[in-house]
Amino acid sequence: MKIAITGLSNSGKTTVFNALTGMNAQTSIYASSMEEPHIGSVRVNDKRVEKLSGIFKPKKTTYSSILYTDFQGLTKGDSAHNRKVFEFIRDADALVEVVRAFTDEVIVHPDGTIDAARDAANLESELILYDLELVEKRLGRMNDAAKRGKRPDEAEKRILDKCQETLYKEIPLRKTTFTPDEQKAIVHLQFISIKPKIIVINVAEADIGKAQPLIDEIAARLDFDKNALISLSGKIEMEIAQLPPEEAESFLKDMAIEEPALDKVINKGYELLGLISFLTVGEDEVRAWTINRGISALEAAGKIHSDIERGFIRAEVVAYSDFISSGTMAEVKKLGLARLEGKNYVVADGDIINFRFNV
Ligand SMILES: Nc1nc2c(ncn2[C@@H]2O[C@H](COP(=O)(O)OP(=O)(O)O)[C@@H](O)[C@H]2O)c(=O)[nH]1
Ligand SMILES: [Mg+2]
């Protein structure tokens, strides 16, 4: 999964990037003209993988991972600059948008004052504007082609009209329901406002855990999903991410932070994107596989290898909790907790799967 961090300059994007990746990229009090993006991969701390690895003692343990990118800030009203930023993040699966709520005289806000709800609204508008340009360019090209006698693809035109209508109302495309066919028809356009978005409110250290009013305000003003709003202190979280795990834990307690930003954002990302994990175990490898909720055992097999999908016979499935309560695979089988499932079985989060296949 690829997540792009975005937001205005000096909102704390790079600080949050460091908090989420444990890296130490240069932050700055000046609006940076960074040309090279920061890119960092981080593993998804899945307790189940850890536990299974302890039991099977495999040669290799593989967690899912997330790729974060941090690029230049967006600028209100500068669509040429923003286009460059959006083109860089157009293949991301989701956005993490940082809005600034901390005050610090030394760190200039590009619009002069601190107003997180205003910034969130402005950023949403920039996403919408970019997509609107994209739609209009596409429709314009279709029109030109029609003038030259080429019959337009009516289905695509209908969907583009629907997008345009939504965007005109200043509604991001993520709030529109598309049929699976419509989704397929527009996926190549790589809209930005269609991507699931998490808004991270970067609060001052003293405001940790006190941002509910701000969360409510932003949710109301943007008609934004409250569940996708997170508040945290980028600065503190960045410090936490640099600490060895034991120290981090006591620091979190001291600061009354329930869950570090790193886990919070990943969990929200999984939830918003509808992702789950299934697990494979053995002496060679214990591994987590990230998939979309609702996919079949056959498709899950294809995630591992196309041969396993092609030669699929059955999926031997054990729920993680059943395995843990039984202790060993032999015990699981004795208790009748291992199931043989067919191609169409819908994989559940935490399924331990052994694919039987024949090539
Ligand atoms: N006081 C305070 N300063 C912060 C916080 N987050 C970031 N900063 C500072 O704000 C400045 C800009 O941060 P940076 O991450 O470089 O912002 P970016 O331009 O969005 O990448 C840096 O000096 C950071 O140390 C925070 O939560 N509290
Ligand atoms: Mg930066």
Image (cartoon, helix red, strand yellow):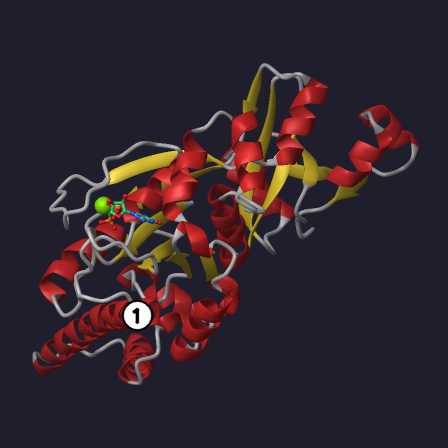
Query: Judging from the image, what secondary structure is the residue with disc 1 in?
Result: helix
- Identify the residue at horizontal 46%, vertical 68% (top origin): 215
Spot occupied by residue 224 in the image (x, y as percentages of width and height): 44, 72
Q: Which residue is mark 1?
A: 124
- Decide if residue 274 is on the left or right side of residue 350: left
The C terminus is located in which quarter? top right
At 20% from the left and 42% from the top, the residue drawn is 28
Determine the residue located farthest toward the right in the rendered image: 335
Q: Position of residue 37 (x, y in %)?
A: 21, 41
Which quadrant, please, contains the N terminus?
top left
Please indicate whether residue 119 sits to the left or right of residue 142 in the image. right
Q: Residues within 10 Å of mark 1 (few under 14, many from 20)?
A: some
Residue 271: image location, x then y, percent:
55, 56
Taking depth in this image into account, of 155 and 211 the one nearest to the observer is 211
- Picture coordinates of residue 253, whole percent (x, y): 58, 40
Residue type at mark 1: give it: Glu
Instruction: Judge whether 3 appears above or below 281 on screen.
Output: below
Q: Nearer the viewer, residue 236 or 261?
A: 236
Q: Is residue 310 visible?
A: no
Q: Is residue 354 above or below residue 224?
A: above
Viewer-nearest residue: 329 or 158: 329
Quarter of the image where one finds residue 116: bottom left
